[in-house]
Every structure is written in C-alpha cells, then in structure tokens.
Amino acid sequence: MNQYCLTCIPGENRIVSDDFKCQCIENYGDNNGTTNICFTKLYQLSQLVIILVEDVKILNQLVVQLVQKSQIDI
C-alpha cells in the first residue's frame, strides 16, 4: 500500500519531501529506516575520530622510525 504524507509526526525530526514522504531533516538519520525518530548523525563524528586516531598511530610509527635512524631529535 502506498502512503503519502501531508504532515509529519511532531518530535520525529522529519519533514515532508517533494514526493510526500516524511524524510529526516538535514544532518539527521533514522539508521536506514530502523527507527521512527531521526537522530543527529553523531556516528559520523565517531568515525572521523577513529580515522584521526589511526592517522596519529601512523605518524607516531614514522617518528619512531626517524628517531631510530637518527634523522630527527625529539
């Protein structure tokens, strides 16, 4: 059954799209349709933190290698 929306349920952080569906507002998500309420996409921030931590680990390894080769002093 097709369902079209004219308004969305208050508090779910959704707006009516051009095709009359309640979509999450910008920068919000519903975990691929698994939740009724749209939440801010904090998981993207946590993914960025993981990437930064991995980059720091790589940089630390490079510094250790350079120190061991006496190419830099710390």
Image (tube, helix red, strand yellow):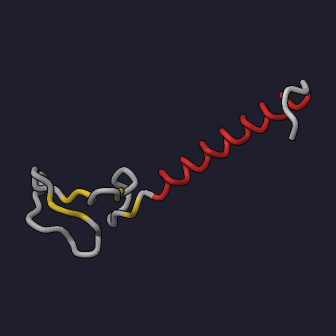
Left or right: where does residue 51 sit relative to residue 42? right
Task: Note whether 5 is above or below 66 in the view shown.
Answer: below
Quarter containing the C terminus: top right
- Name the residue located 39 percent from the left edge and 64 percent from the top edge: 39
Viewer-side residue, 42 vs 30: 42
Task: Note whether 69 is above or below 3 in the view shown.
Answer: above
Residue extending farthest bottom = 10
- Name the residue located 28 percent from the left edge and 75 percent from the top edge: 11
Residue 73 % position (x, y): 87, 36
Viewer-side residue, 29 vs 35: 29
Residue 63 % position (x, y): 80, 34
Residue 8 % position (x, y): 18, 68
Residue 56: name its quadrant: top right
Left or right: where does residue 18 sit relative to residue 37? left
Residue 6: name its quadrant: bottom left
Residue 33 % position (x, y): 33, 54
Viewer-side residue, 45 vs 31: 45
Q: How many marks?
A: 0
- Name the residue located 15 percent from the left edge and 60 percent from the top edge: 16
- Name the residue located 23 percent from the left edge and 75 percent from the top edge: 10
Residue 14: name its quadrant: bottom left
Task: Note whether 43 is above or below 72 in the view shown.
Answer: below
Left or right: where does residue 7 sit relative to residue 45? left
